[in-house]
Image: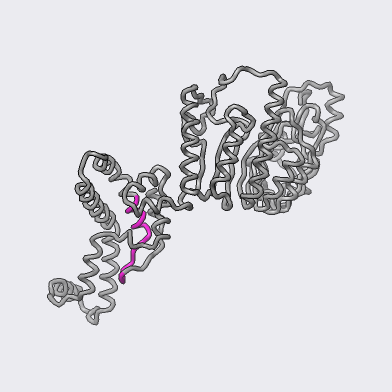
């Protein structure tokens, strides 16, 4: 927050002086962080009379505005003294004479009334006199907890805090025992129940404020027929404004913080039915998003690669960043489906694919075409081999050869590998602007002649017979 405050340089003219945006930022920061504890202790119901509470609020408000003013009083008065000196006819006097004249002017009984008025108004920062848009801009830098605390200050702030555009993020994965970067953290049954209760309270909070979302992050098993997460998420999206939604991160195959032993083990038939329920619920949700949030720019989610899902995904014509993870290990991807997807997204700049090619599809290779793609990462995929690349704007590529331990005799292996194109040949013809290959910066003449470092990178990424000499695939 302090960093955001320090980087604001927008100016708002007021009473002949100049108030900087960072003054408003400092005001909000000082109030929330320095005086929140005092508010909580002094304003508890039943502790004081109403008149005493009003007096406490007035005193606290005066001290807050005075504290915020101290951060901007010196630069403001310094600027006004410079303007006063530049307008004075004695500006060419010596430093001693000008100092005497300034001291005389300060003690003169004929001091300008405008200066007196300005000095009085500068005792308190007039935050409430700022335009509503300015106040909302300041409050937008507060966290959700700080916004709720600020709503307790006064009725004006309480009304401002109900502005829909102050509530831009719906993150159903940010609380609980889960810690970012520690996927192994497990929650108990009691913690999971508390998290579910918090989810519904959080959703009610955003709905009651008519949130206008820019970001949605969630992880719910949409196939769970016990908790009905699919119905919950559909109802939530119907109750908030999603027309401006720009970023979606949705794991629809797993419920956040759900204990592994919450339900008894299922048979393979039950698992297949659960996957079908997940798939159907996801398509229903995805269909709704194509109507309510067509301007999505960033998307991260598991993907089933069915023809219908691909057709829905291609409707998001504003996508810049797309990350698709595998849906099920037994779910394959048709080459023409992948080609259609990348070809149909004209603004796509970044693509991350996690595809697990089944053993039955081991001999299949995939074409990839995109006129806009600049970054491609398929390093988390297994068995993904390219047959054709047409990526004229690509600047960085990350690809990794994964040996899955499939034992083949030499004849079978050679028969497979001879069907695969060398990655180096594909890059030479299909990626003329490539600069970085697996974190290695390519030399200017890489496309005409290979060299030692590039050969080492190809040994780690290419499946062709020239760069793979092993009986394992």
Q: Is residue 405 visible?
A: yes
Pick the residue in front: 169 or 101: 169
Quadrant containing the C terminus is top right
**Within the image, what quadrant is residue 460 found in?**
top right
Pick the residue in front: 60 or 379: 60
Residue ranking furthest to the bottom: 89
- Counting from the top left corner in percent of width and height, residue 316 is at 67, 50
| Range covered by the magenta-colored residues | 15-28
Q: Is residue 117 above or below residue 3?
A: below
252 left or right, relative to 455: left
**Way the structure is coloured:** one colour
Any magenta on residue 16?
yes
**Within the image, what quadrant is residue 39 found in?**
top left
- Counting from the top left corner in percent of width and height, residue 347 is at 67, 53
352 left or right, relative to 308: left
Pick the residue in front: 371 or 274: 274
Residue at 68% x, 44% y is: 287
Q: Is residue 200 above or below residue 319?
A: above
Residue at 49% x, 35% y is: 199
Any magenta on residue 436?
no
- Counting from the top left corner in percent of width and height, residue 9 is at 40, 61
Q: Is residue 127 above or below residue 386?
A: below
- Counting from the top left corner in percent of width and height, residue 126 is at 30, 61
Residue at 21% x, 51% y is: 59
Q: Is residue 433 visible?
A: no
Residue at 59% x, 20% y is: 263
258 left or right, relative to 111: right
Number of marks in the image? 0
């Amino acid at each position: 927050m302090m960093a955001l405050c320090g980087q604001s340089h927008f100016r708002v003219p007021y009473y002949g002086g100049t108030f900087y945006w960072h003054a408003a930022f400092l005001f909000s920061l000082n109030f929330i962080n320095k005086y929140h504890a005092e508010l909580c202790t002094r304003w508890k119901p039943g502790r004081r009379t109403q008149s005493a509470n009003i007096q406490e609020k007035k005193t606290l408000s005066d001290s807050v505005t005075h504290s915020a003013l101290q951060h901007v009083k010196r630069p403001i008065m310094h600027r006004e003294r410079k303007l006063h000196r530049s307008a004075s006819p004695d500006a060419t006097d010596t430093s001693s004479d000008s100092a005497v004249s300034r001291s005389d002017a300060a003690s003169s009984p004929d001091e300008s009334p405008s200066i007196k008025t300005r000095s009085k108004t500068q005792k308190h920062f007039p935050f409430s006199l700022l335009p509503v848009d300015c106040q909302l801009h300041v409050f937008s830098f507060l966290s959700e907890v700080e916004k709720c605390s600020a709503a307790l200050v006064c009725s004006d702030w309480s009304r401002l805090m109900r502005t829909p555009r102050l509530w831009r993020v719906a993150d159903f994965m940010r609380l609980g025992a889960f810690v970012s970067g520690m996927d192994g953290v497990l929650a108990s049954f009691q913690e999971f129940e508390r998290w579910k209760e918090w989810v519904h309270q959080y959703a009610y909070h955003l709905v009651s404020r008519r949130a206008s979302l820019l970001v949605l992050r969630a992880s719910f098993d949409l196939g769970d027929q016990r908790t009905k997460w699919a119905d919950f998420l559909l109802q939530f999206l119907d109750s908030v404004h999603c027309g401006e939604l720009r970023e979606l991160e949705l794991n629809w195959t797993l419920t956040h913080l759900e204990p592994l032993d919450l339900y008894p083990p299922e048979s393979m038939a039950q698992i297949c039915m659960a996957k079908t329920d997940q798939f159907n619920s996801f398509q229903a949700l995805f269909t709704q998003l194509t109507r309510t949030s067509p301007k999505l720019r960033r998307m991260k989610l598991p993907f089933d690669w069915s023809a219908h899902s691909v057709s829905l995904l291609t409707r998001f014509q504003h996508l810049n960043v797309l990350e698709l993870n595998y849906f099920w290990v037994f779910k394959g991807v048709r080459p023409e489906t992948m080609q259609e997807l990348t070809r149909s997204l004209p603004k796509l700049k970044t693509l991350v694919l996690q595809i697990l090619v089944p053993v039955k599809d081991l001999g299949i290779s995939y074409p990839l075409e995109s006129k806009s793609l600049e970054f491609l990462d398929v390093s988390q995929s297994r068995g993904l081999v390219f047959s054709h690349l047409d990526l004229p704007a690509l600047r960085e590529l990350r690809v990794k050869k994964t040996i899955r331990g499939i034992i083949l005799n030499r004849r079978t292996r050679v028969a497979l590998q001879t069907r695969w194109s060398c990655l180096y040949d594909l890059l030479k013809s299909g990626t003329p602007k490539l600069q970085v290959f697996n974190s290695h910066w390519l030399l200017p003449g890489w496309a005409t002649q290979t060299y030692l470092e590039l050969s080492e990178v190809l040994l780690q990424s290419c499946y062709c017979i020239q760069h793979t000499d092993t009986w394992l695939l």
